[in-house]
Image (cartoon, rainbow, N blue to C red):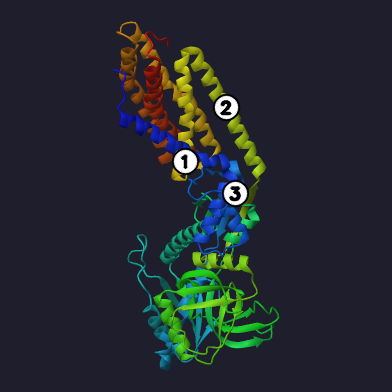
Amino acid sequence: MLQIALWKRLAILLVCVTGLMLAAPNLFYGPVERHNDALTALERGAISTPEIEDALAEWPDFLPSGLVNLGLDLRGGAHLLAEVQLGDVYAARLDGYWPEVRDALREVRAEVGTIRRQDGAPDELRVRISNPDGLQTAVTAVRALAQPIVSLTGVGQTDISVSGAGDVLTVTLSDAEKAATDDRTMQQSLEIIRRRVDEAGTREPTIQRQGADRILIQVPGIGSAQELKELIGTTARLTFHPVISRSVDPSTQPTADQLLYPAMDEPDRFVLLERTPVVTGDDLVDSQPAFDQNGIPAVTFRFNPAGARAFGVYTAENIGAPFAIVLDEEVVTDPTIRDAITGGSGQITGQFGVEEANRLSILLRAGALPAEMTFLEERTIGPELGQDSIDAGQIASLIAMAAVVFFMIASYGLFGVFATVALGINVALIFGALSLIGGTLTLPGIAGIVLTIGMAVDANVLVFERIREELKTAKGPSRAIALGYERALSAIVDANITTFIIAVILFTLGSGPVRGFAVTLGIGIVTSVFTAIFVTRLLIVFWFERRRPKTIEV
C-alpha cells in the first residue's frame, strides 16, 4: 500500500535539508568567498589584519561555507601559455658537476697539470689542462664520475658524455639524460606552479602540459594575466654562496667559477661570489612570514636534514668569513658568520613589507622553478564577460524550468505541482553536491544543469502515466499510486543508468569543458532519480494521508 516507514521519511527529509544547507552559501557568494579566503590565509600562516578580521565576520563559522567554484568562462580570470626554457636546466646541471670534475682532475694533477674552467656554451662544461699529453687520463678520470640514468628510456646509459681535443676537456649531458631531465623539469614545473597558484588562494586552476615544453595555465578569479605572471613567472631561486668580495666595481668581469650580483638594498653595490652554492632553496622544507626583533617584516626558513648539515659544516669551518643569501640573482644580505649555524633555520630581512613577506614565503615554500618560462600567450577574461555568461545561463535555466513547470501542471494538475516542488529541490541538491565536492561550474556545466531540468521530470512522467493506467483497474487510488511507482521503477532505472554511463565516459575521456558538462550531468541524474522516486512520492504520501481522497485525477 501507499506507506513509507518513519525512518525512511526522516532519511529523505535529512538529505533534502542537508542539500539545501550546502547549497545556501551560493546565494551569498561574495561574503562567503571572502570569509573562506581569509580563513585559508590564516591557516597558511598569514598575519592577521583588520581586513582579514572583517572578512571572517561576513559569514558565521557554524554554517556550511562550501561554494561552487566558478570556471574561467563564468568568473573571468587569466589565461597563460608558457614555454619552459629547458636549456637553462642543462647549464645548472653542469654547474653542479664542476666541483666533482675539479676534484677528480686534482687527483691526477701530476699527469694533467693545472686545471682551469673555461667559458663555453650553456650546455657544455669546458676545462683546460696545462699538459695536453695527459688529456686521455683526464677524460678517463672524469668518465668515472658518470652515473646510470634513472628512467625507463635511459636504461643502460650514463648521464654524461666526456670528450677531449687538444688541451680542453668537454663534459656534456648525454641525449638520454637530456630527455629524462626534460621530463623531470616539466613535471617539477607543473607541480610548483600548481602549489604557487593554490597557495595564493585561487580556485580550481587548470594547469596542463602541452607538447614537449609548454604549459597551459588558466586561473579563475585572478585580476589579470600580469598578476598571474608576477606570481608564476618569478623563479624565487634561493642560494647561499661564499663571498669573495663584498664590494667590487660593476665593470669587473667574473671568471667562469665566479658570479657578480648587485645587493638588493644597495643597487650600486656589487658582490663577487663563488659560483657553486653551499646550499640551495631545494633544501628548504618550510618558509613563513614573520617579524624580526625590531618589528620589521621578515621571512623565516628551515632546511631539511641534508641542507642543515651542509650549512652547519660550512658555517663551522668559516667563522669570521662573510656569506651571501642570494634571491633571484640579487644579494639579499651578506652577513659575517659569527657562530656555527647548526639548527638548520634562519631569517631573511630586507626592505619589504607584510605583503612582500607573504609572497616571498609562498614562493620559497613552493620551491624554485627549475627553469625560466617565456609567456607565448596571455589573455585576461574580465568578470563582466563572465557575468554575462552567468546571466545567460540563468535565463536559459529559468526558461527551461518555467516551460517544464507549465507542462507538468497543465498535464497532471496537483501531481504536477508535486513534481515542480521536487524539481526545485533537485536543482538545490545539484548545487549542494557541487559545493560539497568542490566542483567547478562552467558554461557547459550550466548546459548540463539545463539538460537535467528537462530530464528530471521524465521519471515523474513515467510514474504519473503508469498511475493513470492503474487507476482503470486498481482498487482505490492508494493501490494505483503504489503500483504506479512500483511498475515504473525498472523503466526509470534503465533510462538513467544508460545516461549515467555516457556521463562517466565523457568524464573519463574528455577534458576541460567536456568534463564540466559530465560532472553536472552525472550529479543531476543521481539527484533526479532520488527526487522522482523518493521526494515526489513522500509529498504525495503527506497529501494523501491528510486529504484521504476517494478518487484522484492525474
Front position in the image: 85 or 341? 341
Query: How far apart are the two marked residues, 2 and 1, measured between alpha carbons?
Result: 21 Å
Q: Quadrant of the N terminus?
A: top left
- The amino acid pointed to by label 3 is Gly
Return the residue at label 2: 398
Quadrant location of residue 470?
top left
Q: Can you name the residue that lies furthest to the front here?
A: 546
Question: Helix or strand or loop: what does disc 3 sit on?
Answer: loop
The residue at 47%/17% (across/down) is: 416
The residue at 64%/69% (across/down) is: 353
Residue 202 x, y percent position in the rendering: 55, 53
Return the residue at label 3: 221
| Above or below, 12 relative to 318 | above
Return the residue at label 1: 22
Q: Nearer the viewer, mark 2 or mark 1?
A: 1
Front position in the image: 307 or 182? 307
Residue 506: assigned label = none
Question: Helix or strand or loop: what does disc 1 sit on?
Answer: helix
Callout 3: few (<14), some (14-19), or many (20+) C-alpha neighbours within 10 Å? many
Residue 463 x, y percent position in the rendering: 38, 17
Residue 408 in view (yes/no): yes
